[in-house]
Image: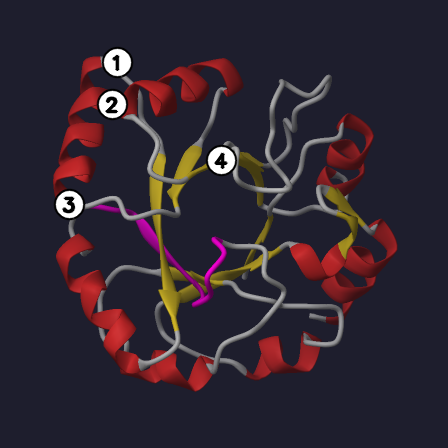
Amino acid sequence: MRIKVCGMREADNIRAVEELGIDLMGFIFWPGSSRYVSHRPAYLPTKCKRVGVFVDATIDNVMSLVEEYHLDAIQLHGHEMPDYLHALRASCMDNSSNFVIIKAFNVATPEDLVATELYQDLVDCFLFDTKAERVGGNGTKFDWSVLSHYQGKTPFLLSGGIGPDDAEAVKSFHHPQCIGIDLNSRFEQVPGRKDIYKLKLFLQQI
């Protein structure tokens, strides 16, 4: 199971979370987020993959931050359409860039999974988050049983309000395309700063 911790921005906290042995660390480049990374942290992880999170950003903006932060993956958490993905892939080829593309979908009912069909061959991974008015970091879960209706071939990360008390629920969740989980707001002391003790204990439990 791959572990992604998202919403990072403070150098000492980044280093401490990295030392827990996680696989992916997310940096949010959307100004509307309380975890927005407005300037480059003094330290960036070297032992796990760096993921940039974008919401309806221009491709030029995405590529600029890919280069500045040496991102290994980008996560699209807005209303990016298939044409956008085609253009992004073309830009990657033009810049000799090779990174993983994750497309997030907000889920509440089986009908919310229908849109994934348009992206099956355009992205490397999906992320299924809780459907809410605010984009990401809401601290609330959705009914994971809805994902039994997902029959696609693209792997996904499970997200949306996973917290310190959800270790058993995570261990009991099974889907052939689920490759990991995304942790964020419910492990925070304040937005953008994770509680290392809670994260460490949770990772030991799962």
Between the C-alphas of marks 1 and 4, the distance is 23 Å
Residue 168 is inside the magenta segment:
no
Quarter of the picture containing the N terminus is bottom right
Q: Are marks 1 and 2 in contact (CB under 8 Å)?
A: yes
Residue 13 appears in which quarter of the rendering? top right
Residue 83 location, x and y as percent?
12, 39
Between the C-alphas of marks 2 and 3, the distance is 15 Å
Secondary structure under tag 3 reads helix
- Between discs 2 and 3, the one toward the N terminus: 3
**Three-letter amino acid code of the residue under disc 2:** Cys
Residue 15 location, x and y as percent?
77, 32
Report the span colored magenta: 122-135
**Three-letter amino acid code of the residue under disc 1:** Asn
Determine whether, in the image, residue 8 is placed left or right of residue 57.
right
Determine whether, in the image, residue 163 is placed left or right of residue 76.
right
Query: Residue at the location (14% across, 35% down)?
Result: 86
Q: Are marks 1 and 3 in contact (CB under 8 Å)?
A: no
Secondary structure under tag 4 reads loop
**Three-letter amino acid code of the residue under disc 3:** Pro
Between the C-alphas of marks 4 and 2, the distance is 21 Å
Q: Mark 3, residues whose alpha carbon is within 10 Å: few (<14), some, or many (≥20)?
A: some
Residue at label 1? Answer: 95
- Between discs 4 and 2, the one toward the N terminus: 4
Between the C-alphas of marks 1 and 2, the distance is 5 Å
Residue at label 4? Answer: 30
Between the C-alphas of marks 3 and 4, the distance is 20 Å
- Which is nearer the eye, 125 or 53? 53
Q: What number is the disc on residue 82? A: 3
Secondary structure under tag 1 reads loop
- Between discs 1 and 4, the one toward the N terminus: 4
